[in-house]
Image: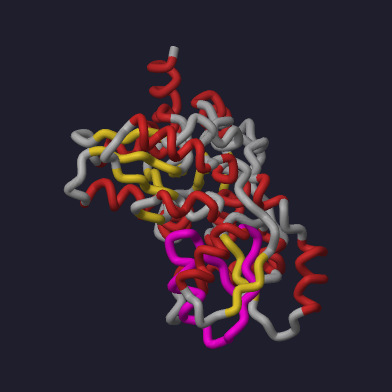
């Protein structure tokens, strides 16, 4: 059945001149049929370069929204419309407006894990790959960082010359990791390097040999002379790591590192999206333009 389904997807993709994009946290079957697999930053950049008529996004809602913001003339479809992001839901536009009024003139840096409405209220977007460099490059001494308090704290540690005003949001998946989880993993795999995403709670950062984004973790494993690693981010990354470094051994830090929203998308969803059974992402043009400004400043900070 899956072989026939994959062939059907390939046929439909060619007929619709479509591009399938997938996040590293997607299930292996989805990663394998995607044209491009990456983290939020890579996918956002790649979306700008495609000449395809349609983008089928295998990820969560804010990612498909970002692709639409950057590609207004293309049809963008989220393969599973029910795949959301609890962290993105933790900052609502009306609340951010009220928060901004307390800090007049202070720029808002929005993690890309936010809605289009929140991006439209922000001065600059960032991903975990470039948050530190982008905040460091701002001329202002104070910055509002939304919504991830953990990534914001990581930025504050790396850019001590800035005052980072944190929003109290977090990733419910990475937040589950506790010190006891790391200790058990290290005991089970002595000598393995511990690589951790900054969305994890700061209370466990001290155990990490390296802190970085999804893409940075993959690069670290690919380029390291070490052969064994404990991976402190969402489980889907293990499939990506097997592809880029098959000779190396990677262990998931904890079984709790599974994002249920990232795991919602199935091959059947992709076929349905390609067949026209899923509504495309639509957006008011005024909203899109306001959100686009913050995203473009993330992708082209020196322009």
Q: State whether residue 204 is above or below residue 154.
A: above
Question: Left or right of 206: which side holds 163?
Answer: right
Which quarter of the figure is the C terminus placed in?
bottom left
Range of residues picked out in magenta: 124-148
**Residue 14 appears anywhere in the view:** no
Residue 62 part of the magenta-drawn span: no
Question: Left or right of 116: which side holds 246?
Answer: left
Residue 68 % position (x, y) = 58, 55
Foreground pick, 52 / 186: 186
The residue positioned 47% from the left and 81% from the top of the image is 137
The residue positioned 24% from the left and 47% from the top of the image is 222
Which quarter of the figure is the N terminus placed in?
top left
Residue 186 % position (x, y) = 37, 37
**Residue 109 appears anywhere in the view:** yes
Residue 144 part of the magenta-drawn span: yes
Foreground pick, 50 / 57: 57
Foreground pick, 256 / 101: 256
The residue positioned 41% from the left and 29% from the top of the image is 28
Residue 300 % position (x, y) = 44, 74
């Amino acid at each position: 059945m899956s072989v026939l389904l994959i062939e059907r997807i390939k046929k439909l993709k060619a007929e619709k001149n479509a591009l399938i994009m997938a996040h590293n946290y997607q299930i292996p079957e989805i990663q394998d049929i995607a044209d491009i697999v990456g983290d939020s930053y890579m996918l956002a950049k790649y979306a700008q370069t495609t000449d395809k008529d349609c983008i089928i996004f295998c990820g969560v809602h804010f990612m498909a929204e970002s692709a639409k913001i950057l590609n207004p003339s293309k049809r963008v479809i989220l393969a599973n419309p029910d795949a959301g992001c609890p962290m993105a839901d933790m900052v609502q536009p009306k609340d951010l407006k009220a928060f901004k009024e307390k800090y007049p003139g202070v720029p808002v840096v929005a993690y890309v894990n936010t809605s289009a409405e929140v991006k439209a209220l922000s001065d600059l977007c960032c991903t975990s790959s470039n948050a530190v460099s982008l905040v460091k490059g701002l001329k202002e001494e104070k910055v509002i960082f939304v919504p991830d308090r953990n990534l914001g704290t990581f930025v504050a540690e790396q850019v001590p010359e800035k005052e980072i005003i944190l929003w109290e949001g977090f990733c419910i998946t990475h937040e589950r990791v506790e010190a006891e989880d790391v200790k058990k993993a290290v005991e089970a795999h002595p000598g393995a390097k511990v690589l951790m995403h900054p969305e994890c709670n700061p209370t466990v950062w001290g155990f990490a040999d390296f802190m970085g984004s999804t893409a940075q973790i993959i690069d670290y494993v690919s380029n390291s002379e070490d052969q064994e690693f404990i991976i402190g981010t969402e489980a889907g990354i293990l499939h990506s790591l097997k592809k880029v470094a098959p000779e190396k051994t990677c262990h998931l830090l904890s079984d709790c590192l599974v994002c249920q929203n990232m795991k919602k998308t199935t091959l059947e969803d992709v076929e349905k999206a390609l067949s026209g059974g899923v509504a495309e992402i639509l957006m008011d043009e005024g909203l899109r333009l306001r959100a686009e400004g913050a995203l473009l400043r993330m992708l082209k900070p020196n322009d």
